[in-house]
Amino acid sequence: MARIVITIEGDSQEIGAIQEVLQRLAGLTTGEFEVSEGVRPLGEREPWTFEEFRQFWSRLQDGARQILAEIAKRPEGYPMVDLERALGVPARVIGGRLSSVGHAMRRFPHKEEPVEFRTGGDDAPGRRIYFMRPEVARTIRRLVSEGASADGAES
């Protein structure tokens, strides 16, 4: 059986673009590619490095940073009702303030979302909960403890 091995080096955006072109040319799906260690299939999000997240954090509005810092205290699941109580603002205000997360993510399209919002399943319909990966929560807590300001510098 013939085998073609192609090594692509570069940043994640370059690699993703090249991989997408190769897949279209070959008419293959991501599952048909053998992916080496350290290389992610097209469409899979990369984890954050501390410096990347610091840059992302610097692009957020103060209100979004405040909300993410609060969620980082309970990353395994922070119910919206508890978050509203802790911040003293209604859900619609929280959602509005988090819009800067989406705007900042445009600069980091291959990175994992820093927070996930889920509504309850069959066992808890109507229940709304925020989740965060533990490593993201640790990074946020570190940035807050270091006093990272809006421009990413120490305050």
Image (spheres, rainbow, N blue to C red):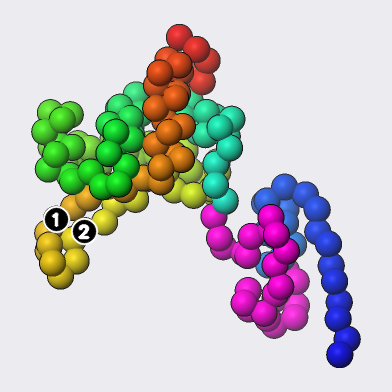
Magenta stretch: residue 32 in it? Answer: yes
Dot 2 crowding, Cα within 10 Å, few <14, some 14–19, many 20+ = some
| Residue for badge 2 | 119
Please state the horizontal and vertical placement of residue 145, each as a whole percent of the image: 40, 18
| Residue for badge 1 | 127
Amino acid on which disc 1 is placed: Arg
Choose the circle earlier in sequence order: 2 or 1: 2
Eyeballing the image, is 83 above or below 120?
A: above
Q: Where the C terminus falls, by quadrant?
A: top left
Q: Residue furthest top?
A: 155
Residue 61 visible in rendering: no
Magenta stretch: residue 93 in it? Answer: no
User: What residue is at 63 percent from the left and 74 percent from the top?
Assistant: 30
Dot 1 crowding, Cα within 10 Å, few <14, some 14–19, many 20+ = few
Eyeballing the image, is 24 above or below 94?
A: below
Give the number of the disc on residue 40: none
Q: Quadrant of residue 74?
A: top left
Q: Residue furthest bottom?
A: 1
Image marks 2 and 1: residues in contact by CB distance under 8 Å:
yes
Which residues are drawn in magenta? 21-45
